[in-house]
Image: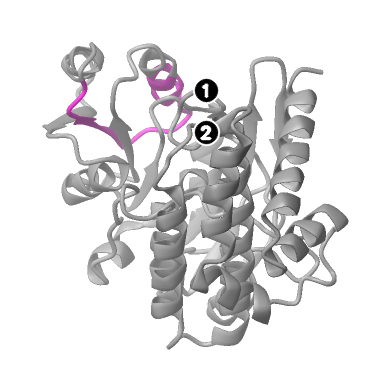
């Protein structure tokens, strides 16, 4: 019997969360699927936990490998996957019991190459359910390139209409992945391995459907890759920006795609500056020195000078104006204010 779905789960030092993740995957209301656990050189008991699940369930498989990061761990899973569709779940997250059944149902109904859904953000004190902005829609090849893919790459000129780029919210046709040799890059090299995968996959898709549910539960754990401070982050967002430009310049709708890439670069830059200010604490001089090197960077100034930020929301516009004017003081103050507002909202 051909497998419907391969669920690839990279695992690295998550003994605290792995059982929670696996229990959600084992209680899916589907049959004929496999779970591929890729132990990426864990130093804790994660490796043993993986082996325990594999010995207990015949459809759970384990790969043990040296640590190379999330992107390459996913690639190891893709190399052995047998399902018609593949999906990716981070080992500190969970999915609802209906998540994959609904994605598969919609994908089969429309003969889709991919089916995407929404996401539920899980914080310590509350949850935020976010349906996909295009929930219920089905895109043909032209619409994927003109509407869906741009929304996955960045915001419009008003700072809105961003649908997200996480591969964890969907299922993807394995045949398209293999026929076009689509693989993940390393998150150690680029700030986001998902967006490069998205560009390559969506460029070869003919039909993409969007599910109504928000069945992927993303846990905001302290110290995870997306939340912790990384001193190399600025170089990573630049490298991603330049690589994205390189791979979309020959695509249809190149102008709109590039505009969205510009907007996401500026959004990533704001986050990078905010993290730098937060990390530096009260060391204003050290923080300002780093900020100055960022906002005076040739790549940053090249983007900010060509991007029309006049229609953006006020706080984003002010941030961009500070960067445009190369004002390290104003940029620092904007980051300080945004960090304060963010922390205040979390502890309400």
Which colour scheme appears in the figure? one colour
Residue 327 horizontal/vertical position (percent) = 71, 60
Q: Residues within 10 Å of mark 2 (few under 14, many from 20)?
A: few
- Which range is magenta? 21-42
Against 110, residue 62 (above or below) is: above
Tell me the quarter of the image containing the N terminus.
top left
Q: Is residue 15 left or right of residue 225?
A: left
Q: Which residue is mark 2?
A: 227
- Relative to 102, say whether 234 is above or below: below
Q: Residue at x 39, y 71 (%)?
A: 243
Question: Which residue: 16% across, 46% down?
Answer: 80
User: What percent of the width, then of the height, locates residue 160?
Assistant: 76, 60
Marks 2 & 1, CB-CB < 8 Å contact: yes
Q: Which is more toward the observer, 143 or 1?
A: 143
In the figure, is residue 69 to the left or right of 332? left
Q: Mark number for residue 102?
A: none
The quadrant the C terminus occupies is top right
Where 315 sits versus 335, above or below?
below
Quarter occupied by residue 153: bottom right
- SS for callout 2: loop
User: How many C-alpha atoms fall within 10 Å of the one at disc 1: few (<14), some, or many (≥20)?
Assistant: some
> Of callouts 2 and 1, which one flags the residue occurring earlier in the amino acid sequence?
1
Which residue of the protein is positioned furthest toward the left in this rendering?
65
Can the viewer see residue 253? no
Q: Nearer the viewer, residue 161 or 94?
A: 161
Indicate whether residue 142 is drawn in magenta: no
Label 2 to label 1: alpha-carbon separation: 8 Å
Residue at 47% across, 43% down: 168
Provide the residue designation for mark 1: 221
């Amino acid at each position: 019997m051909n497998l419907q779905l391969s669920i690839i789960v990279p695992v690295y030092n998550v003994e605290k969360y792995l059982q929670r993740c696996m229990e959600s995957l084992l209680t899916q209301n589907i049959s004929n699927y496999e779970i591929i656990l890729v132990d990426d050189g864990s130093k804790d008991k994660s490796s043993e936990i993986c082996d325990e699940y594999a010995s207990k369930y015949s459809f759970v498989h384990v790969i043990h490998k040296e640590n190379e990061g999330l992107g390459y761990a996913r690639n190891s899973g893709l190399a052995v996957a047998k399902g018609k569709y593949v999906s990716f779940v981070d080992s500190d997250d969970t999915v609802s019991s209906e998540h994959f059944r609904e994605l598969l149902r919609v994908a089969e109904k429309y003969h889709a190459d991919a089916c995407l859904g929404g996401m539920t953000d899980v914080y310590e004190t509350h949850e935020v359910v976010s349906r996909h902005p295009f929930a219920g829609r089905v895109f043909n090849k032209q619409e994927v390139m003109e509407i869906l893919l741009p929304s996955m790459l960045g915001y419009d000129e008003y700072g809105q209409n961003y649908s997200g780029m996480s591969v964890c919210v969907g299922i993807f046709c394995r045949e398209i992945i293999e026929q076009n040799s689509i693989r993940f890059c390393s998150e150690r090299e680029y700030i986001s391995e998902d967006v490069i995968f998205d560009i390559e996959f969506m460029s070869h898709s003919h039909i993409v459907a969007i599910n109504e549910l928000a069945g992927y539960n993303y846990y905001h754990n302290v110290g995870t890759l997306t939340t912790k401070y990384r001193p190399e982050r600025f170089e990573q967002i630049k490298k991603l920006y330049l690589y994205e430009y390189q791979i979309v310049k020959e695509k249809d709708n190149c102008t709109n795609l590039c505009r969205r890439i510009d907007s996401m670069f500026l959004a990533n830059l704001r986050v990078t500056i905010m993290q730098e200010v937060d990390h530096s604490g009260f060391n204003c001089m050290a923080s300002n020195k780093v900020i100055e090197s960022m906002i005076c960077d040739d790549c940053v100034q090249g983007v900010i000078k060509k991007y029309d930020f006049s229609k953006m929301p006020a706080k984003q516009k002010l941030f961009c104006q500070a960067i445009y004017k190369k004002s390290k003081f104003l940029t620092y103050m904007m980051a300080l204010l945004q960090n304060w507002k963010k922390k205040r909202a979390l502890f309400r």
